[in-house]
Image (cartoon, rainbow, N blue to C red):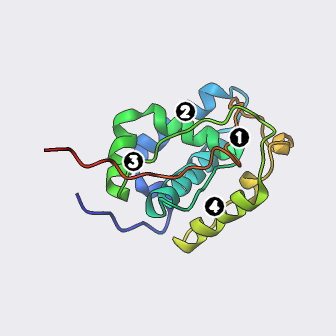
């Protein structure tokens, strides 16, 4: 399967019905969250997955808030596998369980990588873990610095 052209709007990476389902998953995990905020979170997660898939050796990480959207994408396993396939590689999730573990240079590098793809990162959603005045999320993990996402190629089958 060939790598897809990235749409101008990240939410177009998946059909509206799948986007709505992922947004609902974010809202289910965060009952007081408005639909508009959940949609922003899912869209940032799509940008993040695209950045990781297109830059597999860069060592990227989502903010804690964006991680919530990534979790929602991953829970839709068939859709997520198809999305990653179209983007060029499967983006695995390596949890970081310390919610205070925050490395601004990793987040900055992730935002720069997203921008290099032609997307604009939602700066409000790419802040430190203490940014819960904006929105509290269920995810209690932060991926920086030890748990940055680096895609390693699959070994070739022997024989």
Q: Residues within 10 Å of mark 3 (few under 14, many from 20)?
A: many
Residue position for label 2: 24
The mark that comes first in sequence, 4 or 1, is 4
Residue position for label 3: 90
The mark that comes first in sequence, 4 or 2, is 2
Depth check, mark 3 against mark 2: the one in front is 3
Depth check, mark 4 against mark 2: the one in front is 4
The answer to whether mark 3 and mark 2 are in CB contact below 8 A is: no
Q: Position of residue 29 (x, y in %)?
A: 63, 26
Left or right, 74 with reference to 70: left
Q: CA distance from mark 3 to mark 1?
A: 20 Å
User: Label 2's element?
Assistant: helix
In the foreground, 117 or 29: 117
Left or right, 138 with reference to 26: right
Q: CA distance from mark 3 to mark 2?
A: 23 Å
Residue position for label 1: 142
Q: CA distance from mark 3 to mark 4?
A: 17 Å
């Amino acid at each position: 399967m060939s790598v897809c052209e990235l749409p101008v709007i990240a939410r177009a990476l998946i059909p509206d019905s799948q986007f709505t389902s992922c947004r609902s998953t974010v809202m289910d995990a965060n009952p007081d969250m408005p639909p508009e905020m959940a949609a922003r979170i899912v869209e940032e997660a799509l940008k993040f997955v695209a950045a990781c898939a297109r830059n597999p050796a860069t060592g990227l990480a989502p903010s804690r808030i964006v991680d919530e959207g990534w979790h929602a994408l991953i829970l839709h396993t068939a859709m997520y596998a198809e999305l990653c396939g179209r983007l060029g590689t499967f983006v695995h999730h390596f949890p970081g369980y310390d919610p205070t573990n925050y490395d601004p240079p990793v987040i900055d590098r992730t935002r720069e990588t997203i921008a290099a793809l032609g997307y604009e990162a939602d700066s409000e959603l790419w802040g430190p873990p203490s940014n819960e005045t904006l929105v509290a999320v269920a995810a209690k993990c932060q991926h920086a610095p030890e748990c940055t996402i680096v895609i390693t190629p699959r070994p070739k089958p022997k024989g």
